Amino acid sequence: MTRRRPRVLWEPGEPFAASTRLRAYEAWLADYHGVDVAGYDELWRWSVGDLEGFWSSIAEYFDVRLHTPPSHVLERREMPGARWFAGATLSYPEHIFRDRDDAAVAIRHASELRPLEQMTWGQLRELTARVQGGLRALGVGPGDRVAAYMPNIAETVAAFLATAGLGAVWSSCSPDFGARSVIDRFAQIEPTVLLAVDGYRYGGRDYDRAPVVQEIHERVGGTLVRLGYLDGAGWQDGFLGAVGGGGGGGSELVLEPVDFDHPLWVLYSSGTTGLPKAIVQGHGGILLEQLKHQNLHLDMHAEDRAFWFTTTGWMMWNFLVGVLLTPASIVLYDGSPAAPTLDRLWDLAAEAQITCFGTSAAFIAGCMKADVHPAAGRDLSALRSVGSTGSPLAPEGFRWVYDELGADTWLFSTSGGTDVCTAFVGGVPLLPVYEGELQARSLGCDVQSFDPEGRPLVDGVGELVITQPMPSMPLGFWNDPDGERLREAYFAMYPGIWRHGDWIEITSRGTAVIHGRSDSTINRGGVRMGTSEIYSAVLALDEIVDALVVDVDGWMALFVVLRDGAVLVDAVRGALARRIRADCSPRHVPDDVYAVAEVPRTLSGKLLEVPVKRILAGVAPERAASRGSLANPAALDWFAAFARKRADRSAGR
């Protein structure tokens, strides 16, 4: 399908551009290193053309404190196996806490259990020191793992920083994860300590997790430390008493320097098929990437208040904590984004005076369908930018943001991954926003679109690859000593080049469009199309609120969730066919359309296209997907029953 040039929805005026941190970095590069660029595209090309020069400039510009200097900036360039800043030692949380005014606000936080409150830097430092004292009393030291079954609250941020300050390794799951999913993750890393809440509130309902916590503890081991969140009791008696005797004075916070590649945290793949990959990322690589991205690409200033709706089971929580490496503060929310209505997060934006509102494409689509008007009756004057991730944002979503929030809003759609804990395509405050497109490739990220033979494409859809190493790439997978699983995951298709698993189109203007997962792309008669394009067409119909499409051995089926009161009659089927034929291609009109109550999604909102495809192909549901990793596991039951009926019909039973 030939793409028309989209319209420009936003452009940075010169006062805005002149104030950006990216413009200041460009001026510094010219003054101190003689790197004089004419625009962002030249800057990006320099950043990937001189990797050593670029990443050493990030370390210098943001005054990274190396307790011992490196022998090389990039000792080995190959992938996998690149080694950055060999010999250097540093501490990630040292850079979080340095030069902070104890009276300034670090975190604003709210939940369905708690009203909006704030925590100063002094309070965060003290709480972190007290949690750290408790961990040290339990024997936690460098290399030990601290696993957290905790929600998106300030106590979790403090616990992470306490862990990292000791050189221990952090890992977290949201308390809405089922026991099996948590065990599949935490059992791999054998934690020394398991931090867990008693329960949580979501959608106005309280969930007691005590039995689940007990099951998890029995299976993963470690010392269990409880936080009374649902009952308001706080940390269990005696845990914080190791520091300050409960009097609040506390001992000095420990910020242990570690090797550049010392593990900072373990993140996990979605776990929709098989055991989740335990992805290990290091202090130094994450520090450099977040200093670069959160300062230059998000453009965070001292007056900014950054929010992203996430749980602790999604990399966006780690990403949001990384905003504390900037002069800005962060805003946390724990609970349902739709309780009591989809207005809840917009109310929070007004109450907390959020300046950067991060969300998902699914949330924006939900607001559109529910006829939500964010600016109606609330003060959003502080809001200057909106970020979207999790899945491709349709052009209609772009238009809705500008219609509802105004022409001065900087909307940046982003794409990245847990695997690198960042966005490698997304927001650039010096570039225009084109409807339906991501602004540009991120600095230091050599993202390309490859055809099946490994040739770069421009203005064509191909495999999203990264052709040169990034510091935040995984150090490896846990319990994968020879790196076989890592190579199979990313480097099997194009040896020495990272294949991410998305379809991407990079335009001649330098923008990008994500066309969905490459392993769920639908090839009909030689015409390949990402599922996001089909969803964009399908969801344009008022009767449809959600959808999932798969192709199983040449049979293309579309499953739709209907708006209340709507019925899947011939007129709706016909409208779907006409819209897909016009917007996508005649070959991608589905063979069959079915109405379902809901489509299965992961806890971070991603559609389970590949697992559903496997179920329809005859794979048992328990082998196709881990139910505990799903937001709505019961949604799989319909597809399992449907697959059995389809198989029976095929067999003539």
Image (cartoon, grey):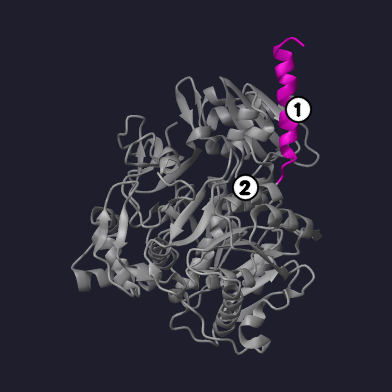
Secondary structure state at the residue bearing disc 1: helix
Three-letter code for the amino acid on which mark 2 is drawn: Asp
Q: Is 645 in the magenta?
A: yes
Q: Disc 1 vs disc 2: which is toward the camera?
A: 2
Of all residues, the one furthest to the left in this rendering is 34
Residue wearing tag 2: 184
Q: Is 147 in the magenta?
A: no
Of all residues, the one furthest to the top in this rendering is 652
Residue wearing tag 1: 641
Highlighted magenta segment, given as a residue range = 632-653
Identify whether 102 is placed above or below 509: below
Neighbours of disc 2 within 10 Å: few (<14), some (14-19), many (20+): many
Question: Chief secondary structure of the magenta span?
Answer: helix
Residue 204 left/right relative to 375: right
Identify whether 540 is placed above or below 434: above
Residue at the (59%, 63%) spot, across then down: 192
